[in-house]
Image (cartoon, rainbow, N blue to C red):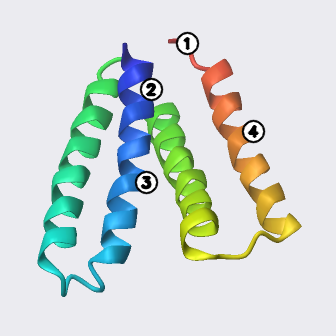
């Protein structure tokens, strides 16, 4: 169950980062409120996952999901660059996430 919590926490990280973008520097109320709620939910699930998963694995996977997911949101919804180098960097991050999962005792 810890891995399910961790993946959902990572997806919520993408959501709160996107809400932060929409908050325009915390000048828009509802995107800011959404960001805080999503952030608290993400941290809450991350903390549940960390009850059984190693710190380095849980945090690394959480930030990796957030990083790759945020780049994908940027590409598909904000017109950010799709350069090959960026895609290769995402592949490297995903490789790290898979490596952490495969080497985790849980």
Mark 1 touches mark 3? (CB < 8 Å): no
Q: Which residue, given by chain and number where applicable, does mark 4 sit on?
A: 95
Give the x, y percent position of residue 90.
Answer: 72, 54
Q: Counting other residues with Cα less than 10 Å from the Cα at mark 4, is it few (<14), some (14-19), or many (20 or more)?
A: few
Q: Which mark is residue 54?
A: 2
Q: Is residue 44 left or right of residue 77?
A: left
Q: Is residue 15 above or below residue 94?
A: below
Mark 3 is surrounded, within 10 Å at the Cα level, by few (under 14), some (14 to 19) or many (20 or more) other residues, namely many
Label 1 sits on a secondary structure element that is loop
Q: Quadrant of residue 54?
A: top left
In percent of width and height, residue 73 lies at 54, 61
Q: Residues within 10 Å of mark 2 (few under 14, many from 20)?
A: some
Residue bearing mark 3: 14
Q: Position of residue 34 (x, y in %)?
A: 19, 60
Q: Nearer the viewer, residue 105 or 30?
A: 30
Label of residue 105 in the image: 1
Disc 3 secondary structure class: helix
Point out which mark residue 56 bears: none
Q: Estimate the spatial distance between the alpha carbons at disc 3 and disc 4, rounded to whole Å.
A: 19 Å
Answer few, some or many: residues within 10 Å of disc 1's Cα (few below 14, many 20 plus, some between 14 and 19). few
Between discs 2 and 1, the one toward the N terminus: 2
Q: Are marks 2 and 1 in contact (CB under 8 Å)?
A: yes
**Precedes in sequence: disc 4 or disc 1:** 4
């Amino acid at each position: 169950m810890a891995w399910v919590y961790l993946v959902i926490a990572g997806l919520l990280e993408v959501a709160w980062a996107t809400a932060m973008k929409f908050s325009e520097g915390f000048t828009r109320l509802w995107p800011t409120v959404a960001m805080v709620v999503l952030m608290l939910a993400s941290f809450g699930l991350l903390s549940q996952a960390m009850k059984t998963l190693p710190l380095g694995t849980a945090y690394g996977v959480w930030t990796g999901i957030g990083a790759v997911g945020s780049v994908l949101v940027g590409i598909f919804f904000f017109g950010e660059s799709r350069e090959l180098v960026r895609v290769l960097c995402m592949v490297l991050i995903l490789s790290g996430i898979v490596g952490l999962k495969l080497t985790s005792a849980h």
